[in-house]
């Protein structure tokens, strides 16, 4: 990783004039009982003086938020530097069986970072870094940032430090991001404007969390309503074997699968 720093010098790297892609490795344990963390490569695409887009490499490559997207982390996070605003774009309330395209939601937030910067220093990914801590989303976080890259941004919703965040991890180490690469992008890269649509539903973080709690209690509510309105009959098969037949049994099967899945996702990056 020392070569990253050397490349910045040799290429005359200017973060104020070039579009930049930062590659992070995200290690996470959504299931607190799972000792082996999952991994996902994430892109932070930065357009100077405009904003940034944070998403998984898989989502970027598929150019889609659809359920068929195989990314483990499907949310897209945009930061508007001028407006000092942040939006999370996702389709969080989808089910394995749907009669229509899942609704896309945009959660708006104006985050005020309350970092406590220390004198502690370390070399991370080849960069000389300084540490800072703060509480966010019900967790305590420690970040390593570098003044070599004077960009007040970082992975996920993090930012607001006097330099790019090279690494950040939760106190229990169940969620962490670390820089794995960076490069200048000569062409156009995704910007927050690319994720604007009149079909998206905008919500405050508080209203979104309320919807999320309702979904956890009854994840097939919308599908139940759609089936009633369509008067269609459904069945679920796997390898040619009928697992459930008729709407009532289908809903029961899907609800069971969804509740089991959600019970294993008991350690999200944000606890509140």
Image (spheres, rainbow, N blue to C red):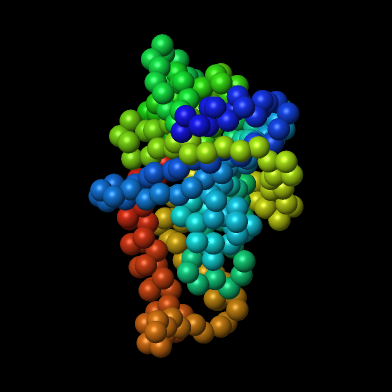
- Does residue 138 show up? no
Place of residue 140 in the rendered image (x, y in percent of width and height, measured from the top left): 37, 28
Q: Quadrant of residue 124?
A: top left
Asked whether, in this view, residue 7 is left or right of residue 141, the answer is right
Residue situated in front as seen by the camera: 268 or 153:
153
Residue situated in front as seen by the camera: 256 or 15:
15
Place of residue 221 in the rendered image (x, y in percent of width and height, measured from the top left): 49, 65
Residue situated furthest top in the rendering: 119
Place of residue 262 in the rendered image (x, y in percent of width and height, measured from the top left): 37, 56
Compared to 36, does 230 lie above or below? below
Which residue: 49% across, 82% down? 234
Compared to 161, does 269 lie above or below? below
- Does residue 28 show up? yes
Which residue: 60% across, 59% down? 62
Asked whether, in this view, residue 253 is left or right of residue 42, the answer is left
Residue situated in front as seen by the camera: 194 or 101:
194
Place of residue 81 in the rendered image (x, y in percent of width and height, measured from the top left): 68, 29
Which residue: 69% across, 45% down? 190
Q: Quadrant of the C terminus?
A: top left
Which residue: 64% across, 57% down? 63
């Amino acid at each position: 990783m020392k070569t990253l720093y050397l490349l910045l010098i040799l290429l005359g790297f200017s973060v104020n004039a070039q579009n930049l892609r930062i590659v992070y490795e995200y290690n996470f344990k959504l299931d607190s009982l799972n000792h082996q963390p999952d991994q996902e490569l994430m892109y932070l695409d930065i357009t100077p003086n405009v904003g940034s887009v944070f998403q998984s490499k898989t989502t970027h490559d598929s150019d889609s938020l659809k359920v068929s997207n195989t990314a483990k982390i499907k949310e897209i996070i945009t930061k508007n530097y001028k407006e000092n605003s942040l939006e999370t774009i996702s389709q969080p309330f989808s089910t394995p069986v749907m009669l229509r395209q899942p609704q896309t939601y945009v959660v708006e937030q104006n985050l005020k970072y309350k970092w406590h910067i220390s004198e502690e220093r370390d070399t991370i990914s080849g960069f000389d870094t300084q540490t800072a801590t703060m509480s966010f989303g019900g967790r305590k976080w420690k970040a390593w940032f570098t003044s070599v890259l004077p960009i007040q941004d970082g992975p996920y919703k993090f930012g607001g430090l006097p330099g790019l965040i090279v690494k950040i991890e939760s106190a229990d180490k169940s969620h962490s991001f670390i820089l794995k690469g960076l490069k200048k992008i000569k062409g156009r890269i995704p910007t927050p404007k690319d994720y604007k649509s009149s079909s998206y539903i905008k919500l405050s973080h508080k209203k979104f969390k309320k919807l999320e709690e309702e979904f956890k209690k009854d994840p097939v509510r919308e599908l139940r309503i759609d089936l009633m309105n369509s008067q269609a009959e459904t069945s679920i098969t796997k390898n040619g074997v009928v697992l459930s037949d008729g709407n009532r049994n289908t809903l029961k099967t899907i609800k069971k699968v969804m509740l089991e899945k959600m019970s294993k996702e008991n350690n999200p990056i944000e606890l509140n």
